Image (tube, grey):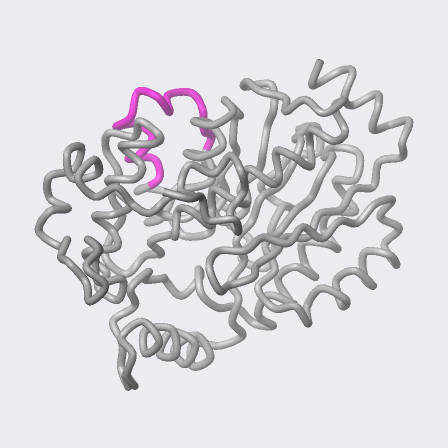
């Protein structure tokens, strides 16, 4: 089947889902697979159980993750989109390493808000062997992430989990001043309130169903801290930008997903004021949806070369 041109060329999910192959590694998936109106095998993407089973199968088939689950109500991530972020981030790093993606545990990423699903450490480690520090304020989410790590031999020693006890901070209070890390990765709460999150989810599920839904069951789920925060994504990324100044010499690339195009110029202006030496906006597309992440560094060209020589060669 032809590749979906929107996804990153390395993304393993560019083809249509091969449901017979996925069912072979996750037999439970068969219970939610049906032929749709176009005559293709598919699932009901508005059904949270079906989406979770699909994720289990994808993680097992493509990433050798034998045991993966999340508690009810927690975010069930769309894996193709999350994989795109990791691949494009790898390309960004490679541009500053003579075109070569650095691999192995010496490359360290901080996943801000690792969540119960632990998806970015899974993808980053299984694709490139990177080590991750996963932070979160939710102890139940961290407990589940730890369970995923402990139950998969492939992830042993690959992820360090830390609880952020200061709910108003992101990096401060959890990342020490002597820790070097090559990048941050983050899927911020996009909404400014619970009501805004509910309205967005209602629109999303209504589009999937093809009819108006008043009170949807979230197909991808989402706990309060995963979906909304005061100030929404603009407030969250603003906080991250301000805190990143204190870690300017400890990290090469600070990055975060940005859902709303209108957020980009506001954050870019702030980062310019904070004297970031480079700011990048990387656009990604999955189907009809355009997403992006913003990346910035405070390192000078000389410091960037020194970082490459010491950590990536």
Whether residue 113 is situated above or below residue 305 in the rendered picture: below
> x, y percentage for residue 101?
63, 24
What residue appears at the point 85 percent right and 54 percent down from the top-left corner? Answer: 274
> x, y percentage for residue 74?
32, 57
Q: What's drawn in magenta, residue-wise?
A: 145-160
What residue appears at the point 44 percent right and 65 percent down from the top-left corner? Answer: 227
What residue appears at the point 71 percent right and 53 percent down from the top-left corner? Answer: 281
Say which of 212 and 278 sits in front: 212
What residue appears at the point 79 percent right and 60 percent down from the top-left corner? Answer: 268
Image quarter hosting the C terminus: top right
Q: Is residue 40 left or right of residue 240?
A: left
> Quarter-wise, where is residue 48 in the image?
bottom left
Whether residue 298 is situated above or below residue 65 in the rendered picture: below
> Quarter-wise, where is residue 242 in the image?
bottom right
How many labels were placed on the picture? Answer: 0
> x, y percentage for residue 139?
37, 48
Say which of 275 and 199 sits in front: 199
Say which of 220 and 62 sits in front: 62
- Tell me if residue 155 is in the magenta stretch: yes
- Which residue is most to the left? 31
> x, y percentage for residue 45?
27, 62
Q: Is residue 304 left or right of residue 151?
A: right
Q: Is residue 71 left or right of residue 12?
A: left
- Tell me if residue 196 is in the magenta stretch: no
Whether residue 3 is situated above or below residue 214 in the rendered picture: above
Q: Is residue 212 left or right of residue 53?
A: right
Image quarter hosting the N terminus: top left
Say which of 289 and 258 sits in front: 289
């Amino acid at each position: 089947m032809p590749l979906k041109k929107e996804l990153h060329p390395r993304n393993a999910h560019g083809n249509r889902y091969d449901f017979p192959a996925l069912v072979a590694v996750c037999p439970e998936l068969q219970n939610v697979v049906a032929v749709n109106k176009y005559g293709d095998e598919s699932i009901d993407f508005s059904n949270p159980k079906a989406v979770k089973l699909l994720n289990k199968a994808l993680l097992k088939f493509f990433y050798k993750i034998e045991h993966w689950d999340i508690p009810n109500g927690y975010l069930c991530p769309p894996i193709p989109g999350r994989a795109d972020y990791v691949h494009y981030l790898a390309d960004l790093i490679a541009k500053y390493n003579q075109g070569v993606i650095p691999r192995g545990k010496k490359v360290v990423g901080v996943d801000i808000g690792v969540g119960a699903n632990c998806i970015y450490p899974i993808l980053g480690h299984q694709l490139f062997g990177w080590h991750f520090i996963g932070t979160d304020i939710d102890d139940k989410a961290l407990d589940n992430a730890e369970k995923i790590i402990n139950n998969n031999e492939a992830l042993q020693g690959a992820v360090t989990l830390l609880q952020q006890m200061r709910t108003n901070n992101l990096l401060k209070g959890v990342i020490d001043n002597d820790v070097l890390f090559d990048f941050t990765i983050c899927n911020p709460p996009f909404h400014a309130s619970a009501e805004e999150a509910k309205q967005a989810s209602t629109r999303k599920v209504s589009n999937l169903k093809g009819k108006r839904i008043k009170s949807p069951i979230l197909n991808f789920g989402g706990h309060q801290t995963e979906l909304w925060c005061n100030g929404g994504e603009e407030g969250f990324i603003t906080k991250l930008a301000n805190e990143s100044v204190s870690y300017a010499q400890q990290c090469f690339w600070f990055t975060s997903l940005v859902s709303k195009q209108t957020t980009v110029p506001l954050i870019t202006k702030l980062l310019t004021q904070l004297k970031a030496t480079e700011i990048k906006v990387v656009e990604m597309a999955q189907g009809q949806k355009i997403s992006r992440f913003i990346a910035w560094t405070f390192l000078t060209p000389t410091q960037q070369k020194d970082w490459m020589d010491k950590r990536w060669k």
